[in-house]
Amino acid sequence: MTPVMWRYGRPALVLLLAGLAVGVPLWLVAVTSAKPQAESIEPNLDLPDRWQPGANYEDAVSQGEMLRGFVNSLLVVVPSVLLVLLLGAGAAWVFARRRSRLVSAAYALCISGLLLPPAVITIVMELRQLGLANTRPGMIAVYTGMYLSTSIFFMTGFIRAIPMELEEAARMDGASQARIFARIVLPLVRPVIATATIMVMLYAWSDVFYAFFVLGGGDRATLPLNLYQVASAQLYLNNWHLVFAYVVVMSLPMVAVFLVGQRKIVSGITSGAVK
């Protein structure tokens, strides 16, 4: 293979492999969610002989109690994301502007969560001791602790690139630390805030493992945990068309968040370049 062919063929090969890795599962989910029950017993990539997406999605929403799961997910994910962003931005500002051994040690401790996996048994035992087991505040605390390290890591590096002269000029004008943080730091870190929001929401919205141990199901079950419950109760036994319809509907909010966040990232980078 000539260098020219390899130069243009390598990106094409990467795009092809990525398209297969992502496109095939998406196609399987989409076409199966539109098939009748008889055709979906053994999921495959074939187009349905008879399309019935409307009935499948309606049954998935009503039988799977998706509205309750959607509300539960919002009540857990939204506060978790807000806490991760607010606490992460505040801690990252301190880590980016202070220089001492104690601050460096605290920063290393905070980002250690990127490498150390959470201990599920320890988390559940601590929540029981605090009376937060099987509660939404307990689930919010777990998500906040799990993803705070990621937020601090990304925001610290971004804030270090912000010129100190902007903050010093605001201090000379009499601005308080809180005002500097709210009016200068937070607007400038909007691109990384959008990135952190997308990452945290994607992880927390689709989580079933930690939700299973912390919430335990019941009326507080989030969307993924609710799907696990109805599938375990054999409500969706051999009804793959309902399972995949549930998955499609559950994924739509995250698709919308990604599209909105992507636009904000691009606009934030562009405005920063203009400034």
Image: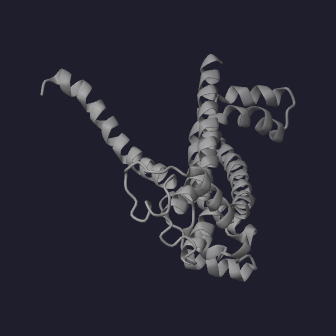
Nearer the observer, 195 or 49: 49
Nearer the observer, 249 or 206: 249
Q: In this figure, what is the number of numbered marks?
A: 0
Q: Where is residue 43 in the image (x, y as percent from the top left)?
A: 40, 60
Q: Can residue 99 be seen in this view?
A: no
Q: Quadrant of residue 257?
A: top right
Where, quadrant-wise, is the N terminus in this rendering?
Answer: top left
Q: In which quarter of the image is residue 118?
A: bottom right
Residue at image point 61% right, 47% down: 252
Q: Is residue 209 above or below residue 171?
A: below
Q: Can residue 201 be seen in this view?
A: yes
Q: Where is residue 254 in the image (x, y as percent from the top left)?
A: 61, 47
Task: Name the image colouring.
Answer: one colour
In the rendered view, does 147 fall on the left or right side of 30?
right
Q: In this view, does 251 lie above or below 131?
A: above
In the image, farthest residue toward the front: 50
In the rendered view, does 198 fall on the left or right side of 3?
right
Q: Is residue 84 above or below residue 275?
A: below
Residue at image point 70% right, 59% down: 70
Nearer the observer, 77 or 156: 77
In the image, farthest residue toward the left: 1
Q: Position of residue 24 (x, y in %)?
A: 38, 48
Q: Where is residue 10 in the image (x, y as percent from the top left)?
A: 25, 32
In the image, farthest residue toward the right: 174
Where, quadrant-wise, is the C terminus in this rendering?
Answer: top right
Residue at image point 81% right, 40% down: 177
